[in-house]
Amino acid sequence: MKNLHYKIIFLIALAANMFLLQDAYSQSQKQKIEKFLIQAMVKERIPGLAYAILDHDKVAMKGTMGIADLSWNQPVSTQTAFQLASVSKIYTGALLARLFSKGIFSPESKLENLIDSIPDNWKNITLLQLATHQSGIQIGNFGEAKDSKEAFEIAKKQPFQFAPGDSENYVSSDYWILQYVIENKMGKPYFEVLKEYITTPLEMGHTFVDYWRGGHVLFSEIIPKKATIYHAANDPERYIEGIFPFVSTGYAAGGIYTSLDDMIKLQRALHDTTFIDINYAKLIFSANPLKSKMGTFGLGTMVYNYDGHQVVGHSGGPALADVCSFEKEGITVIVLTNQRGFYPYLAKSVASFFIPGMKMETPPTK
């Protein structure tokens, strides 16, 4: 096992495949970023990683490092499909913005006009409130649900934590309800709707879900070029695999697999006014206000301040995926990994190499 550990460190460095695509960025800057990421991979024991920096939607730099699957020493490529976990919500935000643009829904569409047989205190909840975690409906045990209709029925039994629009809570039933609303309106499973309006038009050929199902025996669909998820074991010289299943009732909230190349396409599309109407794209990049103060969630995103800079993005896993956009500076950083046991600090740290004066993020002390 000791030999495996050192072999991984060697392969991380050997498999670093960095591309400098704009003359504006120097070779020394590339080397600094590469050095930082290699050191982070060794420190956090990350087997494989892919990353990209977009400057005003043009790829300034992208690269792949390390191993996607340790069993076969399969290196990461720009087509490796990484589990996004909660970063999947960015896809949901993009889908909703597209559906708004097509006139299928409106951000202010109320549940009373979209679905039948709902609790009276649900009637005035809007789609935008659901997508920005403002409904106030407590999280349900959705692991018991076999389909989105069952998940919806579980959500209906949950109490309110606060009145809709008064506050916000990330851990809520919102995205399960949202998925049911989408499926009920469109007449097909959520991921099929996502393919129709997002992945197929953008030619995203490496974005998937695995449809986990079963009881004592688990079954899932085959995902091409899937990165295996790892945890650092207590023994510092070995890794263990970690199954991180999401079922079809909650793909609006998490569980999408995508590649670096596909994530780049999505991030570019968010700024493409021919793909998403600018009025609805703004909902992705702006926090939805609460009744008495500004909120912290956009349409499928988190909107917050970091070292004096507004950041729009999401992390998931907590560190399987980390995406952050600095809209004022025009810089977006994507970092995808296959190790979920560390704090998601890599994306903002990489951004600090591009944004003058911004400090590098450091993970909180344990």
Image: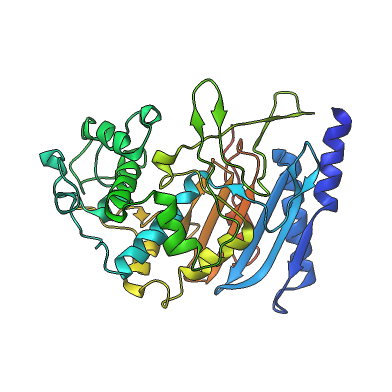
Q: Can you say which quadrant of the picture contains the C terminus?
A: top right
233 to 312, vertically: above or below: above
x then y, percent, for residue 101: 32, 70
Observer able to see residue 363: yes
Nearer-the-camera pick, 9 or 225: 225
Q: Residue at x 27, y 47 (%)?
A: 134
Residue 172, picture quadrant = top left
Residue 107, picture quadrant = bottom left
Q: Can you say which quadrant of the picture contains the N terminus?
A: top right
x then y, percent, for residue 36: 73, 53
Relative horizontal placement of residue 129, taking residue 13 as reference (left or right): left
Relative horizontal placement of residue 1, taking residue 184 as reference (left or right): right
Relative horizontal placement of residue 187, taking residue 322 as reference (left or right): left
x then y, percent, for residue 264: 58, 64
The outermost residue toward the right is 3
The outermost residue toward the left is 120
x then y, percent, for residue 319: 58, 43
62 to 156, vertically: above or below: below
Nearer-the-camera pick, 60 or 216: 216
What colouring style does the render use? rainbow
The outermost residue toward the front is 187
Residue 56, picture quadrant = bottom right
Q: Residue at x 81, y 42 (%)?
A: 73
Q: Residue at x 34, y 39 (%)?
A: 148
Nearer-the-camera pick, 55 or 95: 95
Observer able to see residue 132: no
Q: What count of labels does the image hold?
A: 0
Q: Residue at x 20, y 46 (%)?
A: 166
